[in-house]
Image: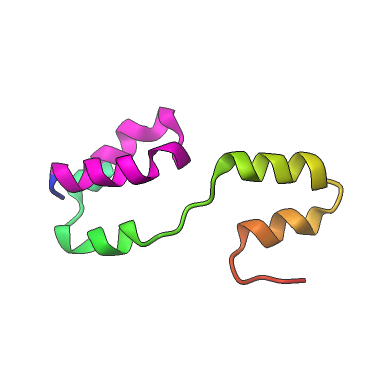
Amino acid sequence: MDANKIDMFFVSNGKKLPSEKAAIIREKMATIDDSRYATISSVEMKDPTTMLLISIFLGRLALIDLCWVIPGWEF
């Protein structure tokens, strides 16, 4: 994959990815074909801060975490 596309991906999703895994993610993306960029960039990532706050305040209701993590799942 082109380095510019990898940089654009990290600009738009860098906050939602673990910083200690950034080098590994860059290496894996460099080996992927350019045609897969549309698929990778269309993945909707959740903000980890939002998940942390939901877990802290609504953690006693275990189903709340599942509804947030599994898209389309409702109880």
Q: Toward the viewer: 35 or 12? A: 12
Please tell me whether the stretch drawn in magenta is mainly helix, strand or loop: helix
Quarter where residue 6 is shown: top left
Please say if 59 is above or below 23.
Answer: below
Residue at 77% in and 71% down: 75
Q: Toward the viewer: 53 or 71? A: 53
Residue at 47% in and 41% down: 16
In the rendered image, the residue lying farthest to the left is 2
Asked if residue 40 lies in the magenta stretch, the reply is no
Quarter where residue 20 is shown: top left
Residue 41: x %, y % from top left: 32, 57
Residue 38: x %, y % from top left: 26, 63
In the rendered image, the residue lying farthest to the top is 20
Q: Which residues are magenta?
A: 3-27
Residue at 67% in and 39% down: 52
Residue 17: x %, y % from top left: 44, 39
